[in-house]
Image (cartoon, rainbow, N blue to C red):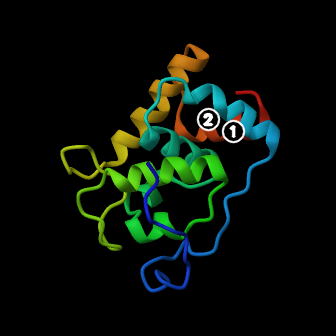
C-alpha cells in the first residue's frame, strides 16, 4: 500500500538541509547493492541504500520525516520509503524518520548493526559502513 507522501522540496524546505539533493547511483553500483537486500525490511533496505549513496550514519541518526520525504529516490526506493513512512506513529515533518516499531528512535549502533549484519549475510564477513560504501563504489574491499 502506497502512502500519500510525495517529495515536495518546497513544502519541507525549512526542515531539511538535504533538500533537492538527488541520490544517484550507477547501474553496477546498484547491482552490487542488491545482494545486501536479501531478507531485509523496507527500513533496512532504505538505510543500506542511503549509506551506499554517500550518507553518513550521524546524518541518518538526525534524519527527520521531512528530510526523508524531500529526497528524490529512484522508483523502487520510493516504494520502500513510503512503506517506512506508513509504519511511523508520528508523521510530523520534524519527527525522527528511522524508528523501531515500538517508536524508539534508532541510534548510531543500530545503523552500524544493519550494515554489519547485511554484509555478514552477503559477503560472509562483517564490514564497517565505510568499507560497505567502498565496496559498493569500487566492487572490492
In the picture, measured across the screen, residue 24 lies left or right of residue 81, that is right
Q: Quadrant of the C terminus?
A: top right
Residue 14 image offset from top left, x and y in percent: 44, 86
The dot on residue 134 is 1
Q: Residue furthest front?
A: 1
Distance Cα–Cα, label 1 vs label 2:
5 Å
Q: Residue at x 63, y 74 (%)?
A: 20
Which quarter of the picture shows residue 78? Answer: bottom right
* Up/down of 20 relative to 96, above or below: below
Mark 2 Cα-neighbour bin, 10 Å: few <14, some 14–19, many ≥20: some
Q: Position of residue 74 (x, y in %)?
A: 67, 54
Residue 13 in view of the camera: yes
Pointer 1 local density, CA inside 10 Å: few below 14, some 14–19, many at least 20: some
Left of 90 or right of it: where is 133?
right
Question: Can you give x and y, in whole percent of width and height, for residue 80 in the image?
Answer: 50, 47
Q: Is residue 106 above or below residue 13?
A: above
In the rendered structure, are the residues bearing label 1 and label 2 in contact, judged by CB atoms less than 8 Å apart? yes
Helix, strand or loop at mark 2: helix
Q: Nearer the viewer, residue 88 or 125?
A: 88
Q: Nearer the viewer, residue 1 or 120?
A: 1
**Residue at the image point whose x is 52% and y is 17% from the top:** 121
The local secondary structure at tag 1 comes to helix
Q: Which residue is mark 2?
A: 131
Q: Which mark is residue 121?
A: none
- Is 90 above or below relative to 128? below
Depth check: give the residue in front, 107 or 1: 1
Q: Is residue 43 left or right of residue 54?
A: left
Question: Residue at coordinates 42% horizontally, 43% vertically from top-left?
Answer: 43
Q: Is residue 53 visible?
A: no
Q: Pick out the residue farthest to the top.
A: 124
Q: Where's residue 94, x and y in %?
A: 32, 73
Amino acid at each position: 500500500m502506497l502512502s500519500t507522501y510525495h517529495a515536495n522540496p518546497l513544502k519541507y524546505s525549512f526542515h531539511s538541509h538535504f533538500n533537492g539533493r538527488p541520490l544517484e547511483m550507477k547501474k553496477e553500483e546498484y547491482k552490487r547493492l542488491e545482494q545486501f537486500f536479501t531478507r531485509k525490511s523496507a527500513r533496512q533496505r532504505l538505510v543500506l541504500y542511503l549509506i551506499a549513496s554517500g550518507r553518513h550514519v550521524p546524518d541518518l541518526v538526525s534524519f527527520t520525516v521531512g528530510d526523508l520525504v524531500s529526497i528524490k529516490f529512484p522508483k523502487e526506493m520510493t516504494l520502500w520509503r513510503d512503506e517506512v513512512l506508513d509504519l511511523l506513529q508520528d508523521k510530523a515533518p520534524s519527527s525522527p524518520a528511522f524508528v523501531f516499531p515500538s517508536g524508539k528512535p534508532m541510534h548510531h549502533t543500530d545503523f552500524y548493526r544493519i550494515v554489519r549484519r547485511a554484509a555478514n549475510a552477503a559477503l560472509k564477513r562483517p564490514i564497517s559502513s565505510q568499507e560497505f560504501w567502498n565496496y559498493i563504489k569500487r566492487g572490492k574491499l
